[in-house]
Image (cartoon, rainbow, N blue to C red):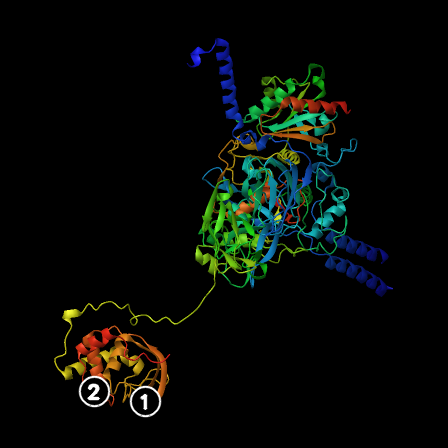
Amino acid sequence: MCKRYLSLLALSMLFIFSSCSEDNDLDIEKFKKENAYEGEEFEPSEESIFNLSSDWENQNGDTVQLNNVAGKPTILAMIYTHCEYSCPLITADMKELHSLIPKDRVEEINFLIVSIDPIHDRPDTLSRFMKKEKMDEKYWTMLTGTETNIRELAAVLGFKYKKSSLMDYAHSNLITVLNPEGEIVEQINGFGTDKKKIIKKVLNYTNED
Amino acid sequence: MGFEMCSNKNKLSFSILLGMITALLFTACDGGKSDYNPANEKVTGESIAELTLPPNVPAPIDPHRAATKLIVNMEVLEKEGKMTDGVTYTYWTFGGSVPGQFIRVREGDEVEFHLKNHPDNKFAHNIDLHAVTGQGGGAAASFTAPGHETVFSFKAINPGLYVYHCATAPVGMHIANGMYGLILVEPKGGLPKVDREYYVMQGDFYTAGRNGEAGHQPFDMDKALAENPDYVVFNGSVGAIAGDNALTAKVGETVRLYVGNGGPNLVSSFHVIGEIFDDVYIEGGDMKNHNVQTTLIPAGGAAIVDFKVDVPGTFILVDHSIFRAFNKGALGMLKVTGDENKTIFSGQMEDKVYMAEGGRSLTLPSAKGSTEQLAGSKAERIKMGENVYKNLCQACHQPDGKGMKGVFPPLAKSDYFANDPNKAISAIVHGLSGKITVNGEVFNSAMPAQSLSDEEVANVVTFLLNNFGNKGGEVSPDQVKKVRSSGTVDKGGH
Amino acid sequence: MIRLHYILISIFLLVGCSVLLSEPPSKIEWISIPSGEFYPFFADTVKPITIDGFFISSTQITNSQFLRFVKSNPKWRRSKIKTIFAESSYLHYWESDTTLGINAPPNAPVVAVSWFAASAYCTWVGGRLPDMSEWEYVASASKNKKNAYNDESFSSTLLRMYEKLPKIPLPNVGEKFKNYYGVYDMHGLVWEWTRDFNSVIVSTDSREKTNQDGKLFCAAGSIGNVDPSNYSAFVRYSMWSSLQAKFCLRNLGFRCVKDI
């Protein structure tokens, strides 16, 4: 007799609680992963882009996170490799910036290029691109990710882009400078800025470490 | 004799001197003005710019002040306001007013412009100042979401009076809702001093309902496209600078109006009724015109008008496309108090009766002349006279000839002309005014002279004599001619 | 003895039901939007694009719905959230981290949330933010017509709805404008986030032709053909182009979609 009532009680409580939580599928792990939130070992600062802990693939197919470039200032741009319009100009700007670093300090700055075309820019495409552009892996990294991750990173950087056809994108021309903590310290919109000045500024961040 | 006679040494000195004098002439005689370039002037110090609500402007800048850095804090506020009695409108404002707050700087100044978009606003806004030399007049740099503030800086390198306005899409709608104002960039040394300065800005408004339709009126895009406004007003609403809100001045003062036109569509024909502009800074620039009645102010443009007020009165500011002034609200007032000056304007001196010489139409020499039909007999004369009476005299003296008591004397059994028909003739050809007594009653009116030929007068008087109980008789055209030339028979008493 | 047990069970059931009834409706009602063709405001071709069918929430996400989210996800509470993900005006109207207060009625749309917070919420409920094309597709419906964008009266009605100054506190969702699909408040309540709001490639000076500034933007197509008479779209696109992902505006909320 007792048992029957207990089970009834248990059933009714189950009924109540299940009705109360009306939302579907609260999968904590899935949610954590997709919302790029936890970094148990490494707690990024308030303004750091390393708060995005999403997974990316680099030019070698390795799975990395953005905090991979932590510890050194980073110059970062978002392009796509088969762009024939202004991306080559952005790439040229990045390479020029790299060339302006004094030879003895060339290891102190990261150069990071993230592709906005996850379909065509797979790791092997990125690898070929880097070889063509003579980008040494010691200083340069290229990343490709998912549509969601790309949109999220673009949102953080204030980078605008839109797919205009099957192959092409319209996008802003933006180069971002991050400090070693991953915080945005400078943004260059458009071309033709004083690059020497920028390098000088970036090198200052290396002394903070 | 001459230059060749001088020694070589002297020739050289002479040439050098000549060269120096020429150089001096070229550089010194332009008064040193061409050396000044506001774009190169260095600034000293920093302060917060004083902004004012219309119709007031900040005080003139000290002419000796060096170029400085000014911080302008401009807040965009979307708010409901009164367009006219019973009608409200949602205004989008710079600084809470339409037009927006007045900015006053000097050429050479550096302006740090802070545009703040109130967090309760619904729309993103920006600003284009026509005084800015640079991309979009600052619009691109100042695009601001609600609850945010953007900052950009510019140097005022051209003096003049400039419009500023919002340039966010749809641009026409933002301007139509009141997002415009004026920025004055004073030339170095300032403008000539005046006693009073005021800020007036015209704008056209487009509402869903027609002019005066009560209630809250939303903006109407179709009317704006058709350039068919319901309200054309100064300073954002009907009567904003009229009645109790009128601008004021005293007799003898010089008044300066900084007048802008925010549009969005209409050009203004700006005029002050009863005043003439002594100086007009055409389109807010350097060129001055004088003695101007009405000046054109383009949409998105401005003008400065200076004038001295010499007599008291209420001087009405209008857009002289006059239906806008009297039917849509483009009307403002400048009330001037002080002593009268009768020589310049006397006001009304008298009002008296005006009696036209010759009926309702001009007394022109009769064109009839020889083609006129002549009466063959007395009976005919009476018949033709009857027609004249019916067409001309009956209206006042009535069909029965009894006239109207106290107004029109009777012709029936009239003792006035009973013994002297010439009196009747005279009344007709010369008119008759003043006191007369007819059949024991006093009349004191004015009968205008009638434009009739001698024949016609003879006819109608003969008709009178033989009707309405009068004794009878006949009058000839010659008789009429005689009376005509000899003047009024009975002048009457005045 | 038996009667006592019956009484106990009844009490439990009653308590449970009252708990359910006192909570404002927090279950999202998903409305099915069938696939169709659509001419987006910024058209790169003369042909329309195809929108695949999807589900959209019938109303904007409410304060009470968002409250349940932050209760289970402390990282998204006002005092905990990182500044890179939301600026200081985050959840401005709420009284505290987990209480709404009088300025945030439970059934009013949640506002002053950043794009990151809105995205996280939609992921939490198994969906995502709508793309601009999806949002515009649903928004083009008037009360009775599926695609009313070319109707002049619709465009002027929308402009008037936009112009109305907002009431504070905001009114409830689901009570005013209901369109052909049965979706509420696509216009007239608050602006809404979209997943790709940062794909509006326009100069911040709206008078410049889009993409003519080759320095600022790489134009790989003719993105810039717009319908100049679609004023309500101009207003919305202006608003979206002024945003950054961390912004928290008092007149900006969101709703979610789910793929089929």
Q: Gap in Å between the C-alphas at discs 1 and 2?
A: 18 Å
Q: Are marks 1 and 2 on the same chain?
A: yes
Residue type, mark 2 in image: Asn
Badge 2, how many Cα within 10 Å: few under 14, some, many 20+? some
Residue in the image at 58% along x and 25% along y: A192
**Mark 2 lies on residue:** B466
Compared to residue A56, the image places residue B86 above or below, namely below
**Mark 1 lies on residue:** B439
Measuring from the top left, give residue C253's x and y in whole percent: 65, 48
* Label 1: element kind: loop
Looking at the image, the residue that sits furthest to the right is C1
Q: Across the whole image, how many numbered discs are drawn on residues?
A: 2
Residue in the image at 23% along x and 73% along y: B485
Measuring from the top left, give residue C104's x and y in whole percent: 71, 54
Residue type, mark 1 in image: Asn
Looking at the image, the residue that sits furthest to the front is B1
Compared to residue B206, the image places residue A100 above or below, namely above
Q: Nearer the viewer, residue C5 or B252?
A: B252
